[in-house]
Image (tube, helix red, strand yellow):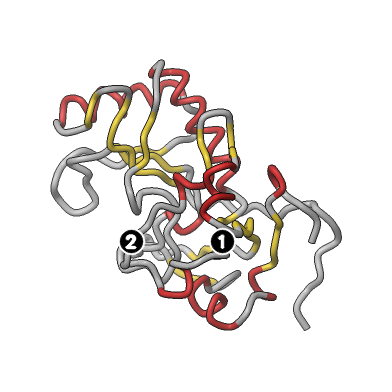
């Protein structure tokens, strides 16, 4: 398929080798925590190397590498390159760019806080991380997000300045965040218009 963003190749996940298909589960229908049926991403940007991840800008201040920073909890086929990012990561980077403008400084995504595949050990309840449409932010400018008041302040700013963004509640209970700010756009699916897409047989 033709090049996507900044020279990254767009691929149909259904055409990837079997180990990748099993880990990414492209286009699979799943149920979220509320019982709604949603579809996992099918189309991805292929990132050939860590060097490519470092040099690829998804927006002026956010690079592909920030969404690919994972550890051994990710499925084994997805720890080596090439690696795959859902196409919705680009509009979500634009959301983070708007938030960065509002805070007036750098916004840092935590390890495992960008894209996570459905096979990642932290993937549960079909989190928007699986769509590349979520980020766990641990630092803003020189401030680490270590206290409830600080997290709430930035959460309120995000909700005022970024239309449609969802912010995880502050706290250490189920569904809460106590050491980071979680922002997401929900289950964003992006089907690229790079060229006519072949349907599976």
Element marked by disc 1: strand
Q: Which of 133 and 5 lies nearest the eye of the viewer?
A: 5
Element marked by disc 2: loop
Q: Residue furthest right?
A: 196
Relative horizontal placement of residue 57, taking residue 192 as reference (left or right): left
Using the image, determine if residue 5 lies above or below residue 47: above
Relative horizontal placement of residue 78, taking residue 15 as reference (left or right): left
Residue shown at 31%/67% (left/top)? 73
Q: Which of 52 and 75 lies nearest the eye of the viewer?
A: 52
Crowd rating for badge 1 (residues with CA inside 10 Å; few <14, some 14–19, many 20+): many
Is the N terminus in the top left, top right, bottom left or bottom right quadrant?
A: bottom right
Residue shown at 27%/22% (left/top)? 142
Crowd rating for badge 2 (residues with CA inside 10 Å; few <14, some 14–19, many 20+): few
Residue shown at 58%/62% (left/top)? 41
Residue hosting label 2: 71
Residue shown at 47%/27% (left/top)? 162
Using the image, determine if residue 66 lies above or below residue 157: below
Residue hosting label 1: 84
Is the C terminus in the top left, top right, bottom left or bottom right quadrant?
A: bottom right
Which of marks 2 and 1 precedes in the sequence?
Answer: 2
Q: Are marks 1 and 2 in contact (CB under 8 Å)?
A: no
């Amino acid at each position: 398929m033709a090049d996507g963003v900044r020279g990254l190749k767009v691929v149909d996940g259904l055409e990837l080798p079997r180990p990748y298909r099993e880990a990414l589960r492209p286009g699979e229908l799943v149920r979220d925590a509320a019982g709604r049926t949603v579809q996992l991403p099918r189309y991805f940007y292929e990132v050939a190397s860590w060097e490519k991840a470092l040099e690829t800008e998804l927006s002026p201040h956010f690079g592909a590498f920030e969404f690919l920073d994972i550890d051994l909890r990710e499925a084994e086929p997805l720890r080596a390159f090439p690696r795959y990012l859902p196409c919705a990561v680009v509009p979500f980077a634009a959301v983070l760019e708007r938030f960065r403008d509002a805070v007036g400084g750098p916004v840092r995504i935590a390890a495992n806080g960008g894209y996570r595949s459905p096979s990642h050990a932290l993937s549960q309840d079909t989190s928007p991380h699986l769509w590349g449409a979520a980020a766990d932010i641990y630092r803003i400018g020189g401030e680490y997000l270590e206290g409830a008041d600080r997290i709430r302040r930035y959460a309120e700013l995000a909700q005022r300045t970024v239309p449609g963004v969802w912010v995880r509640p502050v706290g250490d209970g189920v569904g809460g965040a106590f050491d980071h700010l979680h922002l997401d756009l929900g289950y964003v699916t992006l089907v690229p218009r790079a060229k006519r897409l072949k349907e599976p047989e």
